[in-house]
Every structure is written in structure tokens, then in C-alpha cells.
Image (tube, coloured by chain):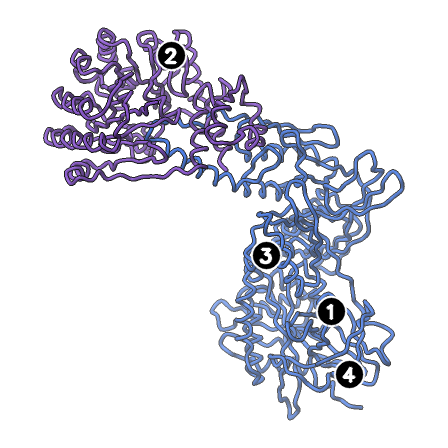
Amino acid sequence: MKTTRGLYVHIPFCLSKCTYCDFYSVAIDTNLIDSYVDALVKEIELASIKNNGVTIDTIYFGGGTPSVLPLSHLEKIIASIYKNFKVDIKEFTIEANPASKIDFAEYRNFGIDRISLGVQSLDDRLLKIIGRKHNSSIALNSIDEANKYFDKVSCDLMIGLPTQTLEQVEYSANVISSKVKHVSMYMLKLSNEVKMAEQISKGIFSLPDDDTFVDFYEEAYSIFKRNGLSRYEISNFSISGYESLHNLKYWNREEYIGLGASAHGFIGNIRYYILSNLKEYISGINYGNGKEISEIIDYKTALFEKIMLAFRLPSGIDIEAFNKEFNVDFEYIFSSQLKKLKPILVKDNNHIFIKEDKLLLESAVAREFLE
Amino acid sequence: MDNRQDKIRNFCIVAHIDHGKSTLADRIIEHTGCVSNRDMKDQLLDSMDIERERGITIKLTPVRMFYNHNGEEYTLNLIDTPGHVDFTYEVSRSLAACEGAILIVDATQGIEAQTLTNAYLAIDNNLEIIPVINKIDLASADPDSCKKEIEDVIGLPADEAPLISAKEDINIDEVIQQVIEKLPPPSGDETAPFRALIFDSAYDNYKGAICNIRVVDGEIKAGTKIKMMATGKTFECTEVGVFSPNMQAVPVLKAGDVGYLAASIKNVKDTAVGDTITSVEGGAIEPLPGYKKVLPMVFAGIYPADGSKYNDLREALEKLNLNDAALLFEPETSGALGYGFRAGFLGLLHMEVIEERLEREFDLDLVTTAPSVSYKVKKTNGEIINVDNPSHLPNPTEIEEILEPVVSASIYTPPEYVGSIMELCQEKRGVFITLTYLDQSRVKVDYKIPLAEIIYDFFDALKSRTRGYASLEYELDGYNPDELVKLDFLLNGEPCDALSLIVHRDKAYARGRRIAERLKEVIPRQMFEIPIQATIGTKIIARETVKALRKDVLAKCYGGDITRKKKLLEKQKEGKKRMRQFGSVAIPSEAFMSILKFDEND
């Protein structure tokens, strides 16, 4: 029985900062990119030693915008991974921004088999408001190009943007889900540090209320369904067989290694993340220490995490597997919660999950299971 | 005949707020060579912030002073009086300990509302009044106009009124001299059996409950066995003394004297204000007039916000009880609020002061129900029961009649406000009794009003309709049946007993609707739709719905989001702990309290 882990690599460079984004990223700087890639390669070497005997089965390049990396640098990183780790790749994803030219053919040569395109919306005015550097026709071209080279193409869609209308949501949802086999749909969630938050507090824009969010979501979901996509996680929809294997590791609470500044990992009973600061990352590696912050997950926390993550999936909690893993009787220890949540939970064939039309109450449900 | 009493003067000072009562008191004390009790006042001030904030005058202990006049030494006893309609009875008993009163009028303001109220109170208690005109040092002072007002409005001769400035220490001696010359001395019988009026009491950790007394007849020494005439309880007197202004034991107190008596009395409830103390052997037969048993008028449920603090609350109430004879309480439980107490108060102000003291001095987080009165219920089986908690009202099918306490209210007012006052009383289901013209400037309006209508804001409404000039006296006058119903509230189908009310049928619909609306506003959306219903018996009279929550989710949850999400959920859970759970419905504490205290006029 071999141990498999996913591998996440963070590429924190972007052409520009979108007004809603709170991921870690910096502007492109050639020297910085060179140093960063060198540091990353060093980290890969160190990590492979720490993960001796482990087989990598999914790779995910996230960011920032991984697609702004020059091909040579990308090749360098990937070559290092293949050289140092034991691999048996079932899925290799890279995130890409339609605003820049993407060499899909070369990506295929590197072993990448899945593209995630940051489309967000097909309404040009909206794209401008949120600071995207492409318009809808560029995005559509990019999707068409990607489809030529890749079987597995995914698009990101955002709903709940300022000034967005139901018609815009319907249009984007329909066009996109008829062109690709996987869509990730997010409801805008602002943190105080992003520019959009400032714009909203200044009254430049306003956000739709919760009820409108839900209406948009439900409309988009029904459109996805019409186009043959199923929901396999709160925010992720795909044709059967085209789910993101790497991301499923998160929700199934399986292990993954994180590399690069601000990357996260989960191995054994430790969740760790690597500090964000690029300069620190680069120099840290040079001195042989990857600055990590670790969190030890105790039994109770692990139990809660399992529940919290499982409820995000339509299959919910597999009772038998859960009981075996944690040596408990799930329905017994949570009998009062299950009683309280009866109207919105379903028990079917050894699984307990949230009703299809109530999945957006996931946090309210999870909270009930906090001791 | 010993003319000892001829050399005693017992008096008080009354005035409208800020007309200079405290300053004059201090000056008189200084001029008599007595040690100022300002230090004591400061001490008291520290511990009675709440009373101060509410404008309740701090009651000071009486002060005994000496003054030489025309070669003779006189004993002057200054007795302080509190002022609020909840405590009218106490005020009247303090006045009963005096023969006279100094009435201060501010020379720049003239007669104001409380000037009149206090003046009439003194007159009604047969006190001789010395008008004094204060603040003559100020530029806008108009003493002549003041004198005229006093004569015209109150009907007191004022041509000899001393013109003083307490602040600048001008003419204070003249006041003292008039006290001696114009006020009658006490005229008790020194040889008769001992009788003393209790006009105040306080609890001392060492001596037990201490009575402030005015000896009317006879004399009292330590060692004498005494009897409280209202309760019949006997004690042995351990100490008698005077206030100079600190407590100072003396061998004997005689007729005409003012001082204190200690008798190792454990419970301040045994020292009822207005009661008469006599001796066990050779004691008096007739008590002094004017004693009334003080009964709580207003009841409320007091619960700890955190159920585990029940004992802390109990201890706090017991401590407050030591020094507050009027506070009653007993344990009770509520389905909605858990374990707590039902407490009885003299009135709304008394209740609010107690609640604030519990919160501030004892650091307790409380949930308190709306104040209510005690009802009598005649059941269909003939039984008559008392109900002071609306949720203990029996099933409507078992009720033949509900009787509510009714008061006889006398409102004293200048004639121009009579119409407005009658309108107010009518609104409050009052029944007109009579109207009496006392004199040109004063009318007495008598109404019988349900107590339940008085306890909320009647007094405030009265004051605002009469620009502060009206005063109110009321006392319990039996129970009357009326069309009263119990208003219940169901949250998600379950009754919330803390919200139950007894209201008059005519007001029930409006009240039920308003409270249901407020509930809808304050109950946060939850996973399920929440129906809110106001019911009388089984009839639903108002209905609101809190829509179900549709979204409570974190859309993105990838590797890096998991830890953050956990923390967020924990934080949210903490936040929700501050909600009170009523069956399956969660309501934020403050919001729930605001509904409990819901006022018709909100």
C-alpha cells in the first residue's frame, strides 16, 4: 500500500492585482522570478528527502498567475519535481490568466494535463470594474485554444460582483458551462485589505444582499445542470469524471505537500504553511531553512475537520468510514445535533449529507458540530 | 414643669432641586459650631452613585446642634428628607419627626414645581414653615418678587423671610434665630410611657439594624426591653445615642429628642418606618398615628444571565435586603429563563435602583422581566389565588374572574392642567372620583386607577403634562375585577413564558401585534423559518414570520483556507453563545431584554 500525496506549488506573480483578490502575489520582476525559481528548486530537493517513499499523484500550480512564468522557468521547476520525487501523476493542473498568451502545446509537453482559466465573467464592463486585464472575447478565445490541447479545462466564475445582474450571471454560466467540462463558481468574499472593500466602503459600489447571492447561485447551478455538469462540491461543478482530483484531497482530508511562498501543506497530523514574504522565502531557503508555521491537529480537531469538510460534498459523511477512522459512533455522539438539524440533513445508505437545496447553509451546519 | 423641651427644635429643610438645601444645611452646621458632616456626605456619595444619578436625594443622618440664643442654649435637630413619589411615605414619616420646616426659594428662580410640592407636604403634615430666600448675592436676584409669590401662591406670610446667601455665608444666623423663635418646641409628655417614632433605619454590621427615632413621650435607656408596636416583636435596647453628626452614645433620650436606638435587631424589616417603639413594661397602649405597612406594589422576575451565577445573585439579593426593608424576593423558575427570583418593590424606581445595584455593585449580568403587579384569580371551583407571575395564571377554562389591584390616586396640581391630567387618567383606565379646589392655586384630583397602569410611566407622563408641577400620592385600594386576559407568545410553536403578560382585553390586540413585530425585528434569521405568534388562550391574535436563512457558507475552501475557516467557525460560535436559546430559537440577549421591557409607548 503506497503513500500518495498531492503536491501544491505556489507561483506568486501577477500582471496586476485584481481588486477582490486576497491571495499572495507580487508584480513581475525578472530577477525576483529567477531567485524565486532557484529557491523553489532547492525546496523541492529538501522536501523530497522529507517525503522519502511517498508517491506524488496530483500536482497543482496555483498563484498568483502561474502562467506568467517564462517557459524555461516552468520547465526547470517541473523537471526538478520529476527528478526528486517519486511520481505517478493522475492529474497535473496549472492556473492561467486568459489576458496573457499561454503556450498550451508546451504545457502538454511538460506533462500538464489540466488548465484552470480565470475567466470570472463574460461581461466586459464587469471585468473592468473588478480589474481583470482581459475582455470576454479574449477569454473565449483562450478557452477555445485550451480545448484544442486539453481534455480537462476548467473555468472560474464569480457571482455577487458589484453591479452584476441575474442576466449577466445566466449568460456567463451558460456560455462557459457549454464550452468546458469543469467550472468553479465563487461568491465574492471580501477581506478588509482588498481594494474592492475600500471602494465599497466609500460607496463607489455596493454588493448584492445575501438573498440575491443565493438567487444567482441557484440560477447558475440549474444552468450547469442543464449543460450536463454536476455539483461535486459547494463551489465546483463538472461532468462526471472531470472532478479536480487534487482539490478533492482537501475535502476528503487527504495529504498534500505545499511548496513556495504562502503554500499550505497537510501531512500526518500537521498542517503547515510557508511564510508569504518572497524575500524571506528566497533567503530562508538559501540558508537551508524553509520557515514554516505548523499546527498540530489533535484528535478532536481532526474529527471536527473531517465533518466540516465532508459536509461540503453532496455525499457528506460516510458514517461507517468515519466511525472506523475515529473510533466513535457518529450518530450517537452527535445525536442532539442531528436531531436539531433534521429538517436540513438527509440520511441515505450510510451517508449523512446536507439537502441539495440547503448546501449553502454549510457553515451553520458545521458550527453545530463544534464541541 | 421641666421646660427642657422648650429648648429643643426639630426641623427639616425642603426646596426645589438646586435651590441650596445642602449648602444651607452645611452653613447652619458650621454656625452652630458642629463638625461639618461633609466628609460623611462624601463617603455616602461614593456608595450611592446610583441614587445620585437618579436624582434621589441622599438621605443623611440627622444632625444635632447647639446654639446660644439670648443667653440660653438650644438643641437643634436637623432631619433630612428624601424626595420621590415612590418614597412619599418615608418622606411623610421624616416630616412627622419635625415640628417645622425651612422652605428655601431661589431668589433668581422663584417658586418652582418641587417648592410647591414640598411646601404642601409640610403643611399637610402640620409643620410650621419658615420661608427663606436664598442666592441674594446673584445679580438677577429678586427677593421682593419671591416674597410676593410665596404669599400669593402658597399663602404663607413672607415679609419676615430671611434674605440669605448660603454660598456667601450671608445672614445664616438670622435663619437659625427664626428657627428658634418661630418654630414650636416639641410638646410630648416626659412622664408618660415611652413612645418613639421610627422615621428611618439602616443596617450596621456591628450593632444590627439601627432605628432613627424621634422620642415623643417618656424616655429610653440602654438595657430597657422594647417592643415594636406594629409587629409586637420585642428586643432589648443595647444603645441609644445622637448624631453629632457621628453616632455618639448617650445615657438617655427623652421626649422631644431625635437620635438613634440599637437593639441587636438582625433584620432591618423589623424596624419599620413609621412604626412606634414603646417599652415592654409600662408601655404605651396607643401607637403614634400615621403608620402604614409598606407593601410591594411592583413585581419582576430577576434571573442571572449565566445560569451558573444563581448563587451569586441570591447572595447579592440577601445583602441588599439587609438595608432595604421594602425589598422582597423569593425563588422562582421560568421555562425560558431558568432559575431565578421574583422580587417585590415599592415602585418602578425602587426596582430600577435595585437592578442597577445588583449589576454594578455585585457585577452580575441579569435578565429581568417587565414589572408587573400581583393579581387575584377567582377560579371556577371557588378558590381564590394570588398570581404575581403572569405565566402562573391558571388555564383560562378554570378562571372565573381576574381581579387587579387598584389604587386611590390623588394628584395635586395647578388648575390649568386638570384637563390634561384627566385625559391621562382616562387613558389609564382610571375612574374619576372627585375634584377638590384646595385654594386658588391648587386642585386635588382623585381617581381610582389600576395599579398596572401606574407602574410604568404614569408619573413621568404626569410630570411632563404639568411641567413638573403636579405631584402624586397613591395607595392600594383593593382589587377590582376587569376584562383581563393573558397574552402569550409562541416562538416556533413553543410558548416563551418569559414574554407572557396580563393585559386588559381592549389593549391586548395592539400590544400583541407590536410585540410580535418587535420580535420579528430582533430575532436573527436562522436555519429554519420561525413563526411568531401572539395568543390569547388558543386564539392567535398576531402573527409574524422570520424568514429562513439561505446562506451561511464559505465558498472557497482549499488547502490554505481550512485552518482559517475553523477559526472563523469557532469565533462565530462564541458570538452565538451570547444569544439566549428559547427552545430552537436563538435571540441576542440585549434584544430579548428590550422586548421584556417593552413599553406601550415605544
What's the residue type where badge 3 is placed?
Leu
Q: Residue furthest left?
A: A31
Q: Nearer the viewer, mark 2 or mark 4?
A: 2
User: What secondary structure is marked by label 3?
Assistant: helix
Q: Which residue is labeled 1 in the image?
A: B271
Check disc 2 and give the amino acid type: Glu
Q: Nearer the viewer, mark 1 or mark 4?
A: 1
Residue holding disc 2: A170
The subunit letter for the residue under badge 2 reads: A
Q: Residue at x 73, y 61 (%)?
A: B439
Residue at (85% x, 45% y) in the render: B384
Q: Nearer the viewer, mark 4 or mark 3?
A: 3
Query: According to the image, label 4 marks what residue?
Result: B219
Place of residue B322 in the rendered image (x, y in percent of width and height, measured from the top left): 67, 65
Query: Which chain appears purple?
Result: A
Q: Are marks 4 and 3 on the same chain?
A: yes
Task: Check disc 1 and report its element: helix, strand or loop.
Answer: loop
Q: Examine the image and state in which quarter residue A121 appears.
A: top left
In the rendered image, which quarter is residue A202 located in? top left
**In the image, what residue type sits under mark 4?**
Glu
How far apart are the alpha carbons under marks 2 and 4? 98 Å
